[in-house]
Image (cartoon, rainbow, N blue to C red):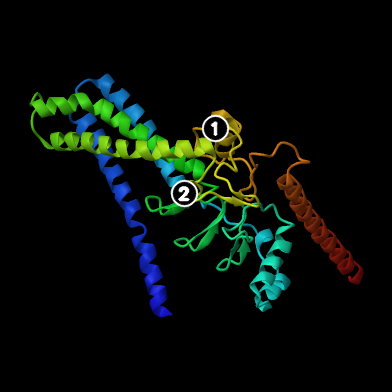
Amino acid sequence: MALSRGLRCCQRVFSWIPVLIITSVVLWSYYAYVFELCLFTLTNTLEKVVYLLVFHVCFGMFSWTYWKSIFTSPSSPCKKFQLSYSDKQRYELEERPDAQKQILVEIAKKLPIHTRAQSGAIRFCDRCQVLKPDRCHHCSVCETCVLKMDHHCPWVNNCVGFANYKFFLLFLSYSMLYCVYIAATVFQYFLKFWVGDLPNGSAKFHVLFLMFVALMFFVSLMFLFSYHCWLVAKNRSTLEAFSAPVFVGGPDKNGFNVGLRKNLEQVFGVDRRLWVIPIFTSQGNGHCFPLKNQTSESRSPLLANENTWEESDNSSEEGSLVEDQDLSVTIEMEE
């Protein structure tokens, strides 16, 4: 037991190494650009001011989105998807697999669940003891179920899911912008150092490597960002791109594709002015999503289930409120 805890502790410590690497590279790039290039190499005051002003805007947005990607929880299923005590007892005491599946089917009727396992059964996580909502998956690294899980990213030491997917996309975009701006403004001085027009010194080393590192990161980020733009346009996660979600009628890789505009709004929200700002504006609650064949409420079992689910939430809240009121009245009468 102690050995297992020690291994987990070591794993958590080592999982921060990629984040420390990225942070170290970014801090070095800050020093190289601000001090070695702008303060020690540039001679034009106006050029210094403009370069530093735009650089700090890019650096600030990059740092903000990176921070949000790391420290924003991707969200897990709510208590409504957990088995109640009685249902858990029924499920654990039942030894027949078919009977266990039927118990899960009965519970799932009250929830907005449309996806199934490859076998056609209700998706259930034995570790978290929850019925998995649509697009939810268990992360073995975070040891929890993640809503609309895309992937576990070691570079942010976090799962990318429903609550932080927008932040992750903005992190990629502002990282590219950061690299492009550095490469564009450093290029002329890179050539001057290369051909010997500027004197040799510590600035030469930093400027040359700054150019190479910016271009290297930009190329790698460009492919990753392009891939995720395609995923957003198709309304798929990375996991769904490799394995199509299974519905009652079978697998359908475009099951959640409701059109380009609505796909974008699901991730970035309706207000386009907030698309480029790392604040949460995604639509929904991560537990249910519109389907491509959803045209009206009468034809959509998703909306019907969602309304039933919300009504049960409201009724439970009203019931608890009535109980609290009755309890307060009883206490006052006793006093």
Q: Position of residue 257 (x, y in %)?
A: 58, 38
* Quarter of the rendering containing residue 65: top left
Q: Position of residue 258 (x, y in %)?
A: 61, 36
- Location of mark 1 (residue): 274
Q: Which mark is residue 247?
A: none
At a point 74% along the width and 37% down the height, the residue shown is: 296
- What's under tag 1, amino acid-wise? Leu
Q: Please state, as top left, top right, bottom left or bottom right, where the N terminus lies in the image.
A: bottom left
Q: Position of residue 169 (x, y in %)?
A: 46, 39
Give the secondary structure at mark 2: helix
At a point 29% along the width and 39% down the height, the residue shown is: 217
From the viewer's side, name the closer residue of 37 and 164: 164
Q: Position of residue 317 (x, y in %)?
A: 78, 56
Q: How many marks?
A: 2
Q: Which mark is residue 242?
A: 2
3D distance between C-alphas at marks 1 and 2: 31 Å
